[in-house]
Amino acid sequence: MKVVIAPQGFKGGISGLEAARAIARGVIAAVPDAETILLPVADGGDGTLHALVDATGGEIFTSTVTGPLSHQVQAQWGVMGDGRTAVIEMARASGLAMLPRGRRNPKITTTLGVGQILKEALERGYGRIIVGLGGSATNDGGAGMATALGVRFLDANGNALPPGGTALARLDRIDTSGLLEQIAGVDIIAATDVTNPLCGPTGASAVYGPQKGATPEVVVELDAALLNFAQVIKRDVGLDVLDTPGSGAAGGLGAGLMAFAGAKIQSGIDMVCQVLDFDSHLAGADLVITGEGRADHSTVFDKAPVGVARHAKAHGVPTILLAGSLGDGHEELYDHGVASVLCISDGAMSFEKALSRTGVMLEGTAERAMRLFLLKP
């Protein structure tokens, strides 16, 4: 029996690779002679860096950059085993998890650190750069990122705008004359699991602003600022990013990467599956087991488990999803190629204890899933 094991990381618990190893132990406990293929995945958010770099035998770097509140932080990024593809997780430089709830403020948070890593990767000569857009603390449309690349954002008096999303309401002119020359000819991919436009009721500010600390009033302010940003980009750069799917990813960083770095928006999970040559491993497979921390309605929007199931279904292979918890709408996953969704919890416990036992619970649930799978006619 051949089982492809492709979970993403369980945030706060274990990494994707650790989760895959735990699931594999459970599979082997039930089927000692099973062939297990470990392919931890990610969808552009947390875990993308290691999913791509570790799987290809690449290298991890650490750079000192500007964090979301303009403080200095240490941010990891890497290069894949091909030696030419850099991988950046924006959340490691400008991420929501870097800020305690009381300090989250999308009016002033910046993507400058993301741009500083991007600049370093460009100056090192990497010909392909993947930027994962999940987990942002920002709503600045990628203006901070572009500033690091040499773009100037000016008000009506010709003064440079301060960091943050609300400052974009005063944007009068964009000067790209100082844009880093090395960006020409480099293939930049913005990997995301969302298709939100930049503005409006499904845009960056309205959908994601509240979790970043925005009140309803601030959401309106940020949305208007990003609208002005898009209008000035269209006039000065010649690119319409307002309604492009994915332009609203990471507080509009998707739009900024398209406008100033020539990036292409791509499904994060599809990009990861392509790099891992995922489909080739499905040949002859009997089962795919994937996993994530919480399965709910949001999972259907091309997050890693659904992407894995979509690829598996195309090859006639069933997918089982192991989840740390189940939320509203998880039943919808059955309409998206997932054959079964199993909660790994094995008893009443605190959230903290559950996190510490993630590996043990994954192993046990994987074993039970395999024993049930063996009962199929």
Image (cartoon, helix red, strand yellow):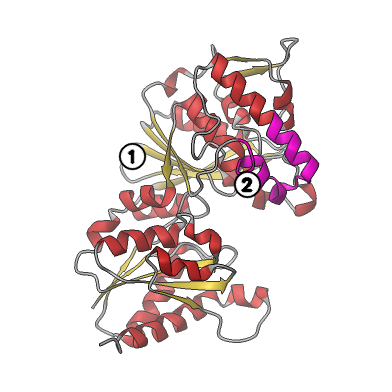
Judging depth in this view, the residue of 347 and 205 nearest the camera is 205
Q: Nearer the viewer, residue 330 or 353?
A: 330
Give the residue number, with chain letter if any, for mark 1. 83
From what the image shows, is residue 172 above or below residue 352? Answer: above
Mark 2 neighbour density, 10 Å: few (under 14) some (14–19) many (20 or more): many
Q: Position of residue 358 (x, y in %)?
A: 54, 75
* Residue drawn at x 71%, y 10% as measured from the top left: 158
Task: Write down the residue under mark 2.
Answer: 95
Q: Residues within 10 Å of mark 1 (few under 14, many from 20)?
A: some
Q: Position of residue 217 (x, y in %)?
A: 80, 41
Instruction: Give the secondary structure at mark 2.
Output: loop
Q: Earlier in the sequence, mark 2 or mark 1?
A: 1
Q: Position of residue 290 (x, y in %)?
A: 41, 68
**Picture residue at 50% right of the left edge, 71% below the top:** 331
Residue 221, position as x, y percentages in the image: 75, 34
Q: Are marks 2 and 1 in contact (CB under 8 Å)?
A: no
Query: Which quadrant would residue 250 be assigned to in this image?
Result: top right
The type of residue carrying mark 1 is: Gly
Q: Is residue 164 visible?
A: no
